[in-house]
Amino acid sequence: MTVRRGQRTVLHRADAAFEPGSVTVVAGANGSGKSTLLETVAGVLLAAEGTVSGVAPRSVAHVAQTVASPGPPLTVRAAVAMGRWGSLPWWRPLRPADRRLVAEQLARLDLEDLADRPLAELSGGQRQRALVATGLAQRAPVLLVDEPTAGVDARSLGLVLDALAAEAGRGAVVVHAAHDPAALASADRVLTLRDGALH
Ligand SMILES: Nc1ncnc2c1ncn2[C@@H]1O[C@H](COP(=O)(O)OP(=O)(O)OP(=O)(O)O)[C@@H](O)[C@H]1O
């Protein structure tokens, strides 16, 4: 697909297929278009040419890159619970199974001690883990995460990579953008964006 942002063609006939049950890392220099690729697959951006196929409506969990802004006044637990809202009609409260799933994701990313803290007050690395947990809580067939390993310490890096591998293990398509050598080494496949194309 070809994707433009303003006057700039960021992706130029970029083409890839992502397999269920595998983790793909999209690498590339700053500004090469990693976020643009994930946003287009997620349906946030529209391709000028080409299409994204095989992705059913509401089947994508897309975790955007951490932003420095304070965001809504949510606790970490509430933020992760938001991952369940998409699977429920608006008038329904979370079911016990949803709450269990939220608790599991908090434990998986070692967020239990931070669960009742406001998301906005976490450090960058802590917030990164919380955002990954929000994506995992969606249990979507397709999980797209923008730089989940940016700024996390060695232990958190392991937790994040293990969690992403486990998502692939349950059959999800997992695609994440990364620069980190450990993230690249742990992926089933690494695609590099260069000059708007995937190599
Ligand atoms: N909202 C926008 N409007 C116009 N151009 C944009 C916008 N967002 C990004 N771009 C441009 O699109 C190109 C690709 O940006 P993108 O954020 O996809 O790169 P990236 O590989 O994810 O970078 P990074 O590693 O820094 O996160 C860059 O040249 C960037 O300046």
Image: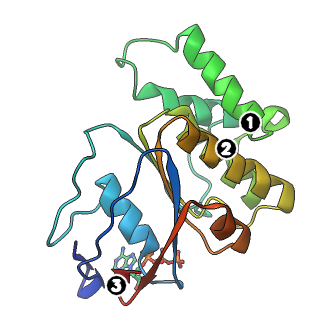
Q: Are marks 2 and 1 in contact (CB under 8 Å)?
A: yes
Q: Is residue 90 visible?
A: yes
Sequence-wise, which precedes: disc 2 or disc 1?
A: 1
Residue 173 pos. (x, y %): 44, 47
Q: Which mark is residue 196?
A: 3
Task: Tell me the amino acid under the disc marked 2.
Answer: Ala
Res. 123 in view:
no
Percent across and percent down for residue 73 are 61, 40
Q: Is residue 74 above or below residue 180?
A: above
Quarter of the picture containing the N terminus is bottom left
Rate crowding at label 3 as few (under 14), some (14 to 19) or many (20 or more) other CA atoms within 10 Å: many
Quadrant location of residue 149? bottom right
Which amino acid is tagged 1? Arg
Image point (23%, 87%), residue name? 7
Q: Earlier in the sequence, mark 2 or mark 3?
A: 2
The answer to whether the residues at label 2 and label 3 have Cβ atoms under 8 Å apart is no
Instruction: Name the amino acid, label 3.
Output: Gly
Look at 67% across and 32% down and name the residue there.
Answer: 105
* Ligand 1 closer than 8 Å to label 2 CB: no
Q: Give the residue pinned by disc 2.
A: 163
* Mark 1, residue position: 108
Q: Residue 18's mark?
A: none
User: Which element type, helix, strand or loop, lies under badge 2?
Assistant: helix
- Taking the image in four quarters, ligand 1 sits in the one at bottom left
**In the depicted view, which residue is nearer to us: 80 or 163?**
163
